[in-house]
Structure formats: structure tokens, C-alpha cells
Image (spheres, rainbow, N blue to C red):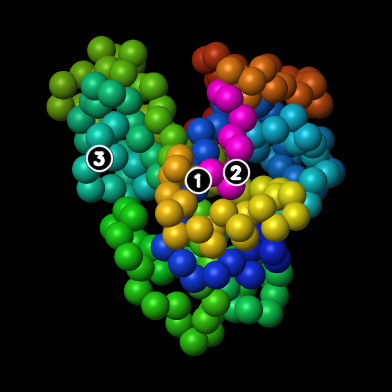
Amino acid sequence: MKSLSAALALIAPVQAGLRFPCSTLTFQRLDPVVEPGSIPSAHLHHIVGGNAFNATMTGDVGERATCFSRGPELPDFPTTPCSGGIFTTQHFPACWDGKNLDSPDHQAHMYNTKRYDGFMNDPPCPASHPVRMPQVAYETVWDTAKFNSMWPSGAPNPFVWSFEGTGAGTHADYMFGWKGDSLQRAMDKSECFYDGCGSITKQPMATANQCTVRDMVGEDSQGWLPELPGMGPTA
């Protein structure tokens, strides 16, 4: 993952939060973060956001999975079927070295203090990465309930992630753009938490759901597939 916007480093250390619902934009093998300009990229992305998305945009992460409820976050899939689907949370590192906007592995300039404690307070940033950044997290509900009847009682978890060729991993990439100092002003408001932030106007979901981008890759990546797009069959 390439660096977060340098503008985020200017955000004041206040208790505030913003929550944005996102709609699906497209499913394509495009990766403007790690493989800018490559069409197709090495693996498939489920892309949410605005229709300015393209293969050449410039812009560390942990992964968790709990049945769909606000219980403890687990480091792997649940061991029994979930009636409400599988809920995943991906927390991005929130400690910056204060110098580098990127690093050769796209990770070393950031440090992750988040473990398996959800949205609890994190420990202080280490001296090597002293700048606390806003905590970015993705929450996704995967509608797996319709497959519960295909999971025999007592059988191991049948699901895999669609990453790393073996289905052993998942990840998220974060790219955001803000007009002027709009993000700074929003985060400076102590009463700004989740949806109660008057300084930012959110797009209605009905409008967001109309956003699409053209097919830039030209391959079928929907439905039942014999192998992961660009990565071969799972082991």
C-alpha cells in the first residue's frame, strides 16, 4: 500500500471520527496503488468509491473476520456458519515515521499498533514512527448466509480469501481526495463523530449507487470461477 496523502499528517490530535457508506463501483483487475498503469493487474479488486477511479491514480493493513455481530474480532474465518454473513474489518496502520511518504515495500514508513481489539484505544506510537495519523478502517459484510446449507455440520470452514494465489489472504487499499482543507476542518470539530459532521456533505447512497466505470480489462470475473483471476486455482 502506498502512503496516505501527506495532507493527513496535518490533522490535529482530537477525538473525532467520520463514517462513509460506500457503493460498489466495479470488479476488475486494476491496482493503481501497487501496480499503477498495469492492465490487468496481478489480482482482482472489489472497487468502491467514485467514478474518477482508473489504472493510473496515485495514492499496511491488517485483516480481521467476526460473524456479522459486534463481538470480538477474530484473526481468521469463523468456525461455524453465520446467520448474518461474515463481517470483516481491515485496520490501517496509524503511526507514521514523519519523513517518508512511501517506502520500497510500501509499509515500512508506517507502523501498526492495532492488534485484535477492534476500535479500542491503541498504545502510543513508537519513537521510530512518532506521528499519530487518523485511524482508517474498512468494514465489509460478506453475504455468505445463502451458502450455509452447503456447509455440513462439523465440517471445516469452506471459505477462502481471494488473494495470494492460495486463497490465504485479503487486503484493502485506501485512496482518498479532499477539497482544500475540508478534511482538516471536519476532524477539528470535536463533535464530529460518524454521521454527525455538518462540515462535510455526504452524497446520497441512491446517487452513489449510480456510479460506474468502464471495463478496462475485458475478462469475466463474476459468478462461480474455476480459479482466482490472474492467480490460478487455490491450493
What residue do we see at 52% from left, 81% from top? 130
How far apart are labels 2 and 1 at the CA level? 6 Å
Predominant secondary structure in magenta? loop
The residue where tag 1 is placed is 197
- For the point 64% across and 20% down, which residue is it? 207
Question: On the image, numbered disc 2 is attached to which residue?
Answer: 200
Residue 38 position in % (x across, y down): 81, 41
Residue wearing tag 3: 70
What residue lies at 67% left-to-right and 48% top-to-bottom?
Answer: 176
- The magenta stretch spans which residues? 198-205
Residue 201 located left or right of residue 86 = right
State which tag comes first along the sequence, 1 or 3: 3
State the image coordinates of residue 205 (x, y, percent, origin top left). Answer: 56, 23
* Residue 24, image quadrant: top right
Front of the two marks 1 and 3: 1
The local secondary structure at tag 2 comes to loop
Q: Callout 3: few (<14), some (14-19), or many (20+) C-alpha neighbours within 10 Å?
A: few
Relative to 203, is 128 on the left or the right?
A: left
> How dense is the environment of label 2, judged by Cα within 10 Å: few (below 14), some, or many (20 and up)?
some
Q: CA distance from mark 1 to mark 3?
A: 24 Å
User: The residue tagged with tag 1: helix, strand or loop?
Assistant: loop
